[in-house]
């Protein structure tokens, strides 16, 4: 084993880790020191099968040569270029390549550095657009219960995950929430899109009746709610949301941070469900997770509403020091080439039935109360231990790690989303490991 692999820091105290049980982790750290394709290498040299594409982002697998070479070349050529009032070619090239693969109603792209920033950017675009076209009374934003839209103030305001919201004061005002679409009593163990629940979209009509459409700027949903534990939209639900939004002049925003870039077997969730949003939020798979970057897609109508007034004036007072950063743009371009050359979105689509069968083979395992799947995403929901919510799933996570598989848990749900290069044998390994783990934990 090389020294590099043995190296572990001698003091873990200073780093306050994100979304982590810090005290538990620091007593028994799970340290990753290298990665290649479908595997991480742990500090003790073990190979860990990546069942989660890192955090839903490494869709092309780890340390892909085209991407690492693009970054290192870019770092030596143009390391940074100011993002305001200046440009560099790769940011423009990337925006064009993204529009090429986006739904055909998308025309322009704003760059950010993360999903959370993409969310807040999209919400600001929506509010400012309504005002730019003379409908400034539309100030309300409608999210959904159990939605995850990152951790910034806009995102947690429209989001619906209680622990992510409850500590942080009043949040944005003028926000309301649709009900979530999880109906286990009707849809448990559905393969793919569940049959029941499209009528939940009609709750938007109730919210409109309450507030009046003239006060509502936008509705934001994830096509498939990922972080809350993979909630797949009922058949017809997204189409219905689209119809109601169109009818009332409300923008529909899809947060595609997880569903973008092949996760469902097509470029975007919008393609998979054949529903066109007005604004589309992405990050994660955009750069294969390698360099932080997000992209917000908007229609020409939205963009053009800002292009008025003297040409020497800034049209939209928003942006980041690192919007379209050269290294991120180079990584994203190389990522898009990799997806295309290896036909990874198609591959995800072809593997989806195998993935579905493999996951549903766990149906009779102990404590399993639901299994859900779509594309190369899956969730296994467990009966919580009475009085100890989340413990059973977290114990599964720890046990799977010991057995060489990285899974992710949220509440008592195991969520899976392997890189799109996963082989059938690796799907088997993941599922067999879970079968053993479910047998072993209390
Ligand atoms: C749907 C969705 N939106 C936004 C985010 C936030 O992205 P980030 O962690 O890059 O800020 C996530 C992250 O998981 C997400 O799943």
Image: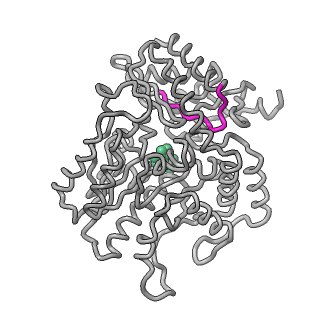
Looking at the picture, how far across and down is residue 394, in whole percent?
A: 49, 24
Q: Report whether 53 appears left or right of 195.
A: right
Magenta-colored stretch includes residue 416:
yes
Residue 337, visible in the rendered structure = yes
53 lies above or below 276:
above
Looking at the picture, how far across and down is residue 114, in whole percent?
A: 53, 53
Magenta-colored stretch includes residue 307:
no
The residue at 30%/53% (across/down) is 142
Looking at the picture, how far across and down is residue 16, in whole percent?
A: 54, 41
207 lies above or below 264:
below
Q: Quadrant of residue 71?
A: bottom right
Q: Quadrant of residue 429?
A: top right
85 lies above or below 289:
below
The residue at 43%/42% (across/down) is 224
Of helix, strand and loop, which mostly describes the magenta segment?
Answer: loop
Using the image as rendered, state which of residue 62 and residue 183 is in the foreground.
Answer: 183
Q: Report whether 221 appears left or right of 69.
A: left
The magenta region covers: 414-424
7 lies above or below 236:
above
């Amino acid at each position: 084993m090389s020294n590099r692999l043995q190296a572990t820091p001698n003091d873990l105290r200073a780093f306050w880790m994100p979304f982590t049980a810090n005290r538990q982790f620091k007593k028994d750290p799970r340290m990753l020191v290298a990665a290649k394709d479908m595997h991480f290498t742990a500090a003790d040299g073990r190979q860990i099968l990546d069942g989660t594409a890192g955090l839903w982002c490494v869709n092309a697998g780890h340390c892909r040569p085209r991407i690492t070479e693009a970054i290192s070349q870019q770092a030596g050529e143009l390391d940074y270029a100011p993002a305001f009032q200046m440009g560099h070619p790769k940011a423009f090239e990337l925006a064009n390549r993204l529009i090429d693969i986006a739904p055909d109603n998308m025309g322009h792209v704003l760059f950010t550095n993360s999903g959370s920033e993409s969310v807040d950017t999209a919400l600001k675009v929506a509010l400012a657009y309504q005002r730019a076209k003379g409908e400034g009374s539309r100030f309300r934003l409608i999210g959904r219960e159990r939605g995850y839209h990152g951790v910034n103030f806009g995102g947690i305001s429209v989001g619906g995950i209680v622990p992510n919201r409850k500590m942080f004061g009043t949040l944005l005002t003028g926000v309301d929430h649709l009900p979530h679409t999880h109906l286990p009593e009707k849809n448990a163990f559905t393969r793919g899109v569940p049959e029941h629940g499209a009528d939940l979209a009609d709750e938007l009509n109730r919210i409109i009746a309450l507030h009046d459409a003239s006060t509502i700027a936008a509705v934001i949903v994830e096509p498939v709610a990922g972080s809350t534990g993979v909630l797949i939209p009922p058949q017809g639900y997204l189409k219905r949301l689209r119809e109601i939004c169109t009818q009332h002049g409300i923008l529909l925003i899809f947060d595609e941070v997880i569903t973008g870039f092949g996760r469902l077997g097509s470029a975007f969730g919008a393609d998979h469900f054949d529903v066109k949003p007005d604004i589309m939020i992405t990050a994660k798979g955009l750069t294969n997770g390698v360099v932080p970057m997000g992209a917000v897609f908007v229609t020409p109508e939205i963009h053009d509403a800002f292009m008025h007034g003297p040409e020497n004036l800034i049209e939209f007072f928003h942006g980041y020091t690192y919007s379209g950063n050269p290294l991120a743009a180079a990584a994203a371009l190389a990522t898009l080439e990799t997806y295309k050359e290896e036909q990874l979105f198609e591959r995800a689509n072809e593997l989806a039935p195998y993935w579905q069968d493999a996951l549903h083979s766990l149906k009779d395992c102990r404590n399993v109360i639901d299994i859900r799947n779509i594309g190369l995403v899956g969730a296994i929901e467990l009966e919580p231990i009475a009085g100890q919510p989340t413990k059973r799933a977290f114990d599964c996570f720890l046990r799977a790690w010991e057995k060489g598989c990285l899974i992710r848990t949220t509440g008592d749900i195991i969520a899976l989303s392997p890189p799109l290069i996963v082989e059938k044998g690796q799907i088997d390994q993941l599922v067999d490991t879970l079968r053993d783990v479910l047998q072993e934990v209390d």
